[in-house]
Amino acid sequence: MTGLGWSDPQGAATVTILLRHGDTRLSPEHRFSGLSDVPLSADGARQVRAAAHRLACGAPIDAIVTSPLRRAAATAAIMRSDPMAMIRSTSRSAMGGSPSCPIA
């Protein structure tokens, strides 16, 4: 056995937290924003601040990975209370449907 895999864990476990961006102006209408660059609404920013407050009680965040869309980047900026946290940009693949189409 090489020591790799699940049978011989070494070191502390990595904790991964997935957090979706807050609401946009399309959210109350139950519309999918897709790859359109819709910003956070005021309510969405409030939601993210509440999530940041809850997560501040845990371990420090070492890295934040976000898409370049404004709503995602704004969410990452609000979450980033530690100035040493890194924000990396990634683009997500299209999830089908056209921007602003209703969510089924």
Image (cartoon, grey):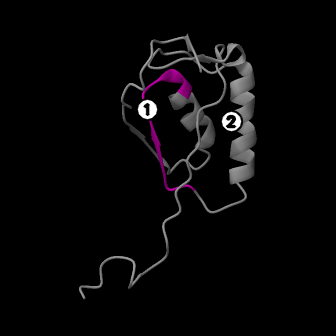
Instruction: Give the percent coordinates (x, y) of residue 76.
Output: 55, 37
The residue at the point 48 percent across, 12 percent down is 99
Asked if the magenta segment contains residue 70, the reply would be yes
Q: Residues within 10 Å of mark 1 (few under 14, many from 20)?
A: some
**Residue 21 numbered tag:** none
**In the image: residue 22, left or right of residue 65:** right
- Reading the image, the residue beneath label 1 is 67
Residue 74 quadrant: top right
Instruction: Give the percent coordinates (x, y) of residue 84.
Output: 50, 51
Q: Label 1's element?
A: loop
| Quadrant showing the N terminus | bottom left
The residue at the point 41 percent across, 81 percent down is 9
Instruction: Give the percent coordinates (x, y) of residue 73.
Output: 51, 30
- Reading the image, the residue beneath label 2 is 48
The residue at the point 58 percent across, 37 percent down is 20
Asked if the magenta segment contains residue 48, the reply would be no
Q: Measured along the vertical axis of the image, is residue 61 above or below residue 40?
A: below
Residue 85 or residue 49, whichever sits in front: 49
Q: Label 2's element?
A: helix
Q: Earlier in the sequence, mark 1 or mark 2?
A: 2
Q: Amino acid at mark 2?
A: Val
The residue at the point 46 percent across, 24 percent down is 69
**In the image: residue 3, left or right of residue 55:** left
Magenta part of the chain? 61-71
